[in-house]
Image (cartoon, helix red, strand yellow):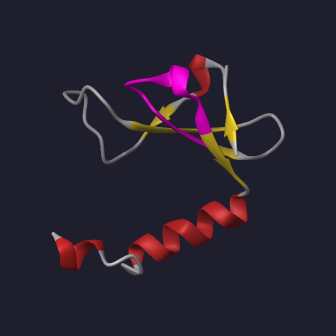
Amino acid sequence: MKRHNLPAYAWRKSSYSDNQQVGCVEAQLTDDGLIAIGDSKDRTRGAFVFTPSAWTSFVGAVRRDAFGSRAAG
């Protein structure tokens, strides 16, 4: 699911991004308790929203390399 028009002040940049990067992954907690993930380069495209449990599961899978990204790189 996507959301648009989320408040600009609520975005938090990923800790893996530094101040020199033009585009970053950003996150914010929505009023209804979902986690919104967006691209700082183009906020007009909206943000994907996840339940906290779905986001935790996704992050855990990335950490375990469940998608095989390290092998491809």
Task: Return the x and y of residue 63 as percentages of the image width and height.
Answer: 40, 74
Residue at the extreme right of the image, as rendered: 32
Q: Is residue 3 magenta?
A: no
**Is 20 situated left or right of 40 in this image?**
left
Q: Quadrant of residue 39?
A: top left
**Residue 47 placement, left or right of 40:** right
Which picture quadrant has residue 36? Answer: top right
Query: If the image is split into quadrants, where does the C terminus sit?
Result: bottom left
Q: Is residue 19 above or below residue 25?
A: above
Q: Position of residue 17 (x, y in %)?
A: 29, 40
Above or below, comparing residue 66 to residue 37 in the picture: below
Report the label total: 0
Query: In the image, which residues are magenta?
Result: 36-47
Q: Residue at x 42, y 71 (%)?
A: 62
| Vertical arrangement, residue 27 with respect to residue 4, above or below | below
* Residue 24, percent from left and from top: 35, 35
Judge whether 61 appears above or below 34 on screen.
Answer: below
Is residue 43 rendered magenta in the image? yes
Residue drawn at point x = 79 percent, y = 45 percent: 33
What is the quadrant of residue 8 in the picture? top right
> Which residue is at a point 65% across and 19% down the rendered structure image?
7
Say whether residue 68 is left or right of residue 37.
Answer: left
Judged from this view, the residue extending furthest toward the left is 73
Q: Nearer the viewer, residue 32 or 47?
A: 47
**Residue drawn at 50 percent across, 34 percent down:** 12
